[in-house]
Image (tube, rainbow, N blue to C red):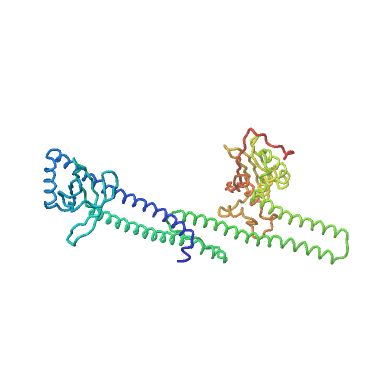
Amino acid sequence: MNRLLRTNAFRLAALYLLLFVASVLALLAFIYFSTAGFIERQTEATIDAEITGLREEYGERGLSGLLDIIHTRSTAPAPHGDSTLYLVTDPALQPLAGNLSAWPRAEQIRPGWIRFPVEVRTRQGTVTSSAIASVFVLHDGFRLLVGRDLRDAEAFRSRITRTLAWAALLTVALGVGGGLFMTRHMLSRVEAVNRTSERIIRGDLSQRVPLSGSGDEFDQLAANLNAMLDQIERLMLGMRQVTDNIAHDLRTPLSRLRARLEVTLLERPDAQRYADALRETIAEADHLLGTFNALLSIAEAEAGSRRETMAVVDLAEIARSVAELYEPVADDKGLSLTVESDALIAVHGDRHLLSQAIANLLDNALKYTPAGKVALRAHRQGGTARIEVADSGPGVPADRREAVFDRFVRLEGSRSTPGNGLGLSLVRAVARLHGGDAWLEDNEPGLKAMFTLPVADSRIVPATRNAA
């Protein structure tokens, strides 16, 4: 309970409870004073009507007729609930007729109206109550007092007070109970998140926040947290895979490099042998540097650190320039490399990264196509620029087309083909950096690799190659 009372949810519920109770009490007070005022107004209206009738009788029959009427009304059996008070006095305030034994000691509440205590006989005995009356002065100093006993009004007011007090108490009790229930409910949902977080902190990344199925904001929060945890688990799994692949891909060239240098030192000194060993060592170092540079480029693209250097460039011109560089490679392998592009495709991007992404797609297509042709296409479709590289090679199985975009993923288990398994990862990272995406499709036969980018405003002149 102490922990529950210290929670922010309970404080919030208590604040709303105070506001609710204050509004209910204000409403009950309004009802009380409105009811009490209505009863007093009704009582005064009854007295005014009685005074008006007696005044008319006095005008018609005089003082003796008024005394007869007062005597008759005072001595006649009173209807149930009738508590009208009458008194007629001479100028010396001596009683002449009525059901009051003497002129009361009263306080004036306003001109012509007084309030005074009165003793009333009931079945339980004599009780003291209060009464209000209106005083009418007759000719020659005679006075007429007509009033009402407020015993019934006070009883009704007391009953209203008790009723409203119980209603206020019940409201507070229900408010406290509802606040505690709501607080415990909210706390249970928060505790579910805390328990899941604690298990994840202890290393169990498979834990997820349970959903209640209500679809409320807590379920939406839990769903977002679960999606975030899924992404974190995928990233951690990818990190482990990257670590394993880096260890595998770098261990072999480093071992060869060290063994080559060690053998060179053990053999008889020979300048030519030393030169060959150095050339092979530089080649191995270049391969390692290429791997690290590719990783660095992917990290920069995913982090978006090169967005500030972007400018409007001609994607079609970049594609044609990269194709020119790979034409000799295609000729050496006996492959046909064709280029189809629009005259101008303006995009807002980084020339170096876009060139590298297109180069990676062409390099993969030429590397894995034993015979046939490779086609590079750069077209604009509405508000999207599209780069396609299609080949006639063996292709990629449909169930592996998404996996090959992960770092160091290669289809061949022997990993004997030159490369580091980072090309397609860089392509997707560059595409997403520029607001697009990359994917693979079947070329029937072969493979079609592509990525898309949003086009820039055609009124902006693309940067030239030298300016880039």
The location of residue 419, given as percent across then percent down, is 69, 54
In this image, 309 relative to 231: left or right? Answer: right
Q: Hey, which quadrant is residue 358 in on the image?
A: top right
What residue is rendered at 51% in x and 54% in y?
224
Count of residue discs: 0
Residue 336 at least partly seen = no
**Quarter assignment of residue 229:** bottom right
Name the residue: 49% across, 59% down.
Answer: 8
In the image, residue 467 above or below residue 256:
above
- Tell which residue pokes out farthest to the front in this image: 92
**The C terminus is located in which quarter?**
top right
Of residues 151 and 86, the one nearer the viewer is: 86
Residue 429 position (above or below residue 412): above
**91 and 260: which is toward the camera:** 91
Q: Nearer the viewer, residue 53 or 190?
A: 53
Left or right side of 292 for 281: right
The quadrant the N terminus occupies is bottom left
The structure residue drawn at horizontal position 61% and vertical position 51%, both measured from the top left corner, is: 394
Give how far across and how far down residue 261 sits, in percent. Answer: 81, 63
User: Which residue is the extreme one toward the top?
Assistant: 459
**Residue 200 in view here:** yes
Residue 313 position by quadrant: top right
Q: Nearer the viewer, residue 120 or 437?
A: 120
Residue 283: percent from the left, percent from the top? Answer: 77, 55
